[in-house]
Amino acid sequence: MSTVEAAGTRGGVGPILSVRDLHVSYETREGPVPAVRGISFDLGPGETLGIAGESGCGKSSMAAAVLRLLPPEAVVSGEVRLDGEDVFAMTPGRLRAVRWTEAAIIFQGAMHALNPVWKVKHQIGEAIELHDPKVAGKTRTRVDELLEQVGLPARRAEAYPHQLSGGQRQRVMIAMALACRPRLLIADEPTTALDVMVQAQVLALLAELQTDLGLAMVFITHDLSVLTSCCRELAIMYAGRIVERGPSHQVFVDPRHPYTRALAAAFPTVGDPRFRKAPLGLPGDPPDPRARPGGCPFTPRCPDAQSECSAEEPNLRVAGPGREAACVLVGRTR
Amino acid sequence: MNPPPSPLLELHDVHVSFTAGKHARSGAPIARAVDGVDLSVDRGEIVALVGESGCGKTTLARAILGLEQPGRGQIRFDGEALPTSSKGLRAYRRRAQMVFQDPTGALNPRQTIYESVAEGLRIHKIDGDEEELVAGALSRSGLRPPEQFFLRYPHEISGGQRQRVVIAGAMALEPALLVADEPVASLDASVRGEILRLMLGLVEQTNIAMLVVTHDLGLAWNIADRVAVMYLGRIVEVGPTEQVLDTPKHPYTEALLSVVPETKRMEQQILQGEPPDPTRVPAGCRFHPRCPALANGEAARLGIAARCESEDPQPISVGPNHAAACHRNTASPAEPPGTAHGT
């Protein structure tokens, strides 16, 4: 992942996903509410990027904007290129095709995303028949193959969603997402509603599929600790912007932005005496997008805030090899 | 020295079961949600009850609050059995308060913050100046100055503040026990620590007893004095937090610890399959069908594999105040069976 000029050529070695200066805001009666305020990144084939942030930081709006899944009241600007092709310029038909064959998305809450009156085989089969006419007639074979890939027995194809557990439904969602062999998978909080052990199962499955199929993956969650185990690169969002990015383990253990530091400390290491009987949090609340303070939006909650912080919002700056952080303190000795 | 007073909350062999469906016939499956639990919580102590969903931890919490009637066993509070009369229960529920996971659902959206906190005071006819009591409760929960919150509605404050209001409403009644079911699971990560810190502070200031139901071992490490691990209706391991989470003595605790993303010190043991079904509790050790120690041959090497499949292990002492229900702990030749019995 880098911020160099987008140079993706279709089918070439360019990034599979390229996002440039993406802005999303929502029209409301009180005026536009900005959710995403200028995000840029590139994702190469087979690369994994984790995006972490709290509710309201704009991470889900960003994900939905990439595949143009936002409601009509959303105003979007900037550029998104999928394998070199401008997503915002696509015709509706092209977009429908691209959504399954190039990039697929898995949402949180698999229980609501499946049609309750359709059997699993029909839900997965529909996606295949609509987008991959070559396999028509052999749909069932492909369904079984997909179920096996996600670790479900083929007989589960005959089940209705209510007959499956939460973890199994999330596996069905993953199977559907893989139905048309996309090269990019966007997972928005895919394990949030799941139990710890089932979460571990689903994460292990995603990691395995990512390696086996060479998928590029954008993994979005509020749970920073999950991302470090399954993504190579990490981007931290706050108030609609990326405030820090870099190799995931480094970002987690040696954060450069005060917000990342606070967020990482909120996930205690079991067995580490520093966290024993010492929960660490961050005073204050995530900023209200309707009333964002001037300057760096983190200033009101920042333990290291300087007088200059409320004057101007800092941009990302180099904070070590392959690392960037949007904080005036980067590079200064603290 | 005087003998130590009995713990505030004591559970002995508590069973709660449900029949499936309203129209259950005789022979319909019975779900043994809580299947013989012994547990105590003392004044000034935080006990974390951890386990997967479906392990019975929420049913156990409901039984403690008198919302479910145990079919067998006993729950004692302050030395006495839980009351069963509605009058007795009402008095009890003032002293044993509950905080739920979702503060948005727990607050009436059309009630001001003041009304939400005052409601409990009115129901229980608490003496004293109502406004002063509400202000004191809000302020102790970190909502300062309290007057600023009186006339606001739940949707006008943040999720973290809403959970503080719920805690203020519970603490206003000066309970002796607080049962919190996943108190921070629905909150943002940066806010979570602040709420946990509030709970720790309340225990220090008021000597209240707290039972925190959670699936989050990090939370237990953050605030709990003791951890009780529940599996399929039974406490399989219990002890001081450091011992249970640093040197677990039950394979299930080990598996749970191994999948916490922040612990990199052990190899992941991802248990296959779904959380088990309380209508079909396996014979022998209830964990044996998913047990890594049985699957990887460790149990066979220790010569206990047959017992795992046939004999229900009882909790035995594995350290100071630390007990686990696993045959592995009686298999070591250094500790012949029979010498370490009793919890």
Image (cartoon, coloured by chain):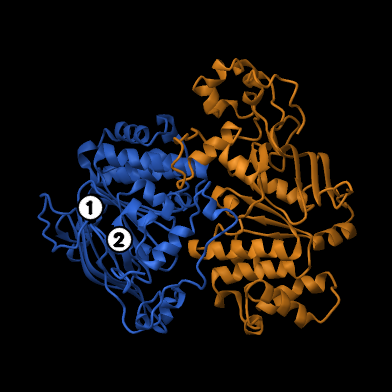
Where is A138 relative to B187, above or below?
A: above
Q: Give the colour in which the image draws chain A.
A: blue
Residue at numbered disc 1: A97
Where is B35 relative to B336, above or below?
A: below
Query: How busy is the neighbourhood of tag 2: few (under 14 within 10 Å), some, or many (20 plus)?
Result: many
Between B30 and B227, which is closer to the camera in this rendering? Answer: B227
Q: Secondary structure at mark 1?
A: helix
- Please, what is the three-letter code of the amino acid marked with disc 1? Ala
Residue at numbered disc 2: A245
Q: Chain letter of disc 2?
A: A
Can residue A46 be seen at all in this image of the molecule? yes
- Spot occupied by residue A217 in the image (x, y as percentages of width and height): 29, 50
Q: Quadrant of the C terminus of chain B?
A: top right
Between B142 and A50, which is closer to the camera in this rendering? Answer: B142
Q: Which residue shows up at 64% across the image and 41% down it?
A: B229
- Please, what is the three-letter code of the amino acid marked with disc 2? Arg
Q: Closer to us: mark 1 or mark 2?
A: 2
- Spot occupied by residue A125 in the image (x, y as percentages of width and height): 33, 41
Q: Give the colour in which the image draws chain B.
A: orange
- Spot occupied by residue B99 in the image (x, y as percentages of width and height): 67, 60
> How far apart are the two marked residues, 1 and 2, measured between alpha carbons?
32 Å
Where is residue A145, by image quadrant?
top left
Where is B223 relative to A70, above or below?
A: above
- Spot occupied by residue A134 in the image (x, y as percentages of width and height): 20, 38
Give left or right: position of A165 versus B331.
Answer: left
Give left or right: position of B336 versus A332.
Answer: right
Q: Chain letter of disc 1?
A: A
Can residue B283 be seen at all in this image of the molecule? no
Mark closer to the chain start, 1 or 2: 1
